[in-house]
Amino acid sequence: MKIPYGKQHITEEDIEAVVKTLKSDFLTQGPAVSDFEEAFSKVVGSKYAVAFNNATAALHLSYKILNRDSLKKVFVTPITFASSSNCVLFENGIVEFVDIDPLTYNIDINLMEEKLRKNPTDYQGMIIVDFAGLPLNTEAFRKLADKYNLWIIEDACHAIGGSYRNSKNEIIKCGSGIYSDLTVFSFHPVKHVATGEGGMVTTNNEEVYRHLMNLRSHGIQRDEKLFLEASHGGWYHEMQELGYNYRMPDINASLGSSQIKRINSNIEKRSSIAMKYKDSFKNLPITFQKYNEENVFNAYHLFVIETDNRKILYEFLKERSVYTQVHYLPVYWHPYYQSIGFKKGLCPVAENYYTKCLSIPMFHSMTDLEQGYVVDTIKDFFSSFL
């Protein structure tokens, strides 16, 4: 039995949806993309959704649009994929890493507020990550952002389907845009919804929505009502700003539309897997994310454990065909970030977390037999080595 830490699940319905697109008149710039965007916005509760060829492109344009002053810093967590902060560097911006909460592994709002109190005018925004699928309390971050005139990009690439209850006991879905200016999602194969590669930005701001639509397609405007000069004819279009080719092909979008129909059952399965893990490991010397489970619904892209025996456990599981992963090396430990001036020791909680964290198999097609094997193998490790 070979068990990966994550994998896609493709059904016959998914295949039929893609084949239908392959037989259609459009493989790109056709109706499948807008159909997927509409379906996605309904799921997360936003007014608008814009699809991209990947989530890195989505992050890049999100920052590009919100960026007010590249000399002002942007808060980012060190425990995330590099794209979360790279998008700032793409536009020659300045990143400031904030340490994580040792219980949730999410960015620590209290440390962020300390930095703002000391230097209230040095910052312009924050990119906050719902790590492993655990939603941040964006209501609290919005309050802080408004106090210091900051914008918020919520990186919810792990958190499709995640939600929490705000101070009014209302359910706030990741991507609804109630408190975040823009929210970014990923459709990488190991995510809840797979398109091969793909990303999405959700927003409730029509002006920002239209700007994203333009920038993802070379900055070209095709709507005659928005032309800057009179149309020359039916062929005419205008490049009104320097944009990019960040479009999602219809092939990918058709797969996404098929997959998103199963989002609720996928999330429920991941939640069930997580609960079984927690119950199975309660007497072992490992820890995992801690949060108020009555008020927060974790989407569980990952199930991360912490152990003082991470390297040995990793190798033990690998020898028995259970494949795990580490999420993540602190971003500023990467050689590139070191080369531009970041030093180790910057975020001690994140660095300590990195020495212990291990993402064990979590995917919505996991069978009871597969999960049982993972649990038994981890228990065997601790009974043999401790």
Image (spheres, rainbow, N blue to C red):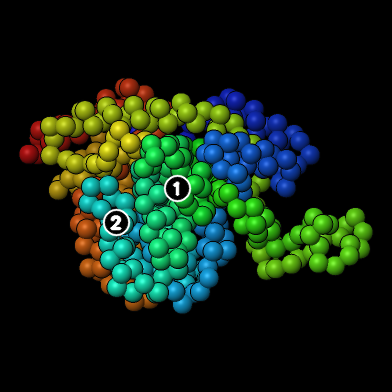
- Rendered view: 326 above or below 332: above
> Could you say which quadrant of the image residue 133 lies in?
top left
Mark 1, secondary structure of its residue: loop
Whole-percent x, y for residue 46 in the image: 56, 43
Q: Is residue 28 visible?
A: yes
- Which secondary structure lies at badge 2? loop
Q: Amino acid at mark 2?
A: Asp
Q: Nearer the viewer, residue 241 or 333?
A: 241
Where residue 356 appears, as percent x and y from the top left, is 20, 50
Classify 267 as above or below 101.
above
- Residue under the point 44% across and 40% down: 172
Which residue was labeled with disc 2?
Answer: 108
Please tell me the numbered disc located at residue 284: none
Residue occupying the point 60% across, 44% down:
47
Gap in angstroms between the C-alphas marked 2 and 1? 16 Å
Which quadrant holds residue 114? bottom left
Which x, y percent locates residue 264? Answer: 47, 28
Query: Can you see residue 126?
Result: no
Residue depicted at x 47% and y 56%: 153
Residue type at numbered disc 1? Ala
Of callouts 2 and 1, which one flags the residue occurring earlier in the amino acid sequence? 2
Query: Do the residues under discs 2 and 1 have CB atoms within 8 angstroms?
Result: no
Q: Quadrant of the C terminus?
A: top left
Of 198 and 316, nearer the camera is 198
227 left or right, relative to 301: right
Please name the residue that numbered disc 1 is placed on.
156
- Where residue 40 appears, as percent x and y from the top left, is 57, 39
Please, is residue 34 above or below residue 379 in the view?
below
Badge 2 density bin: few <14, some 14–19, many ≥20, Cα 10 Å: some
Dot 1, crowdedness within 10 Å: few (<14), some or many (≥20)? many
User: Nearest the camera: 326 or 299?
Assistant: 299
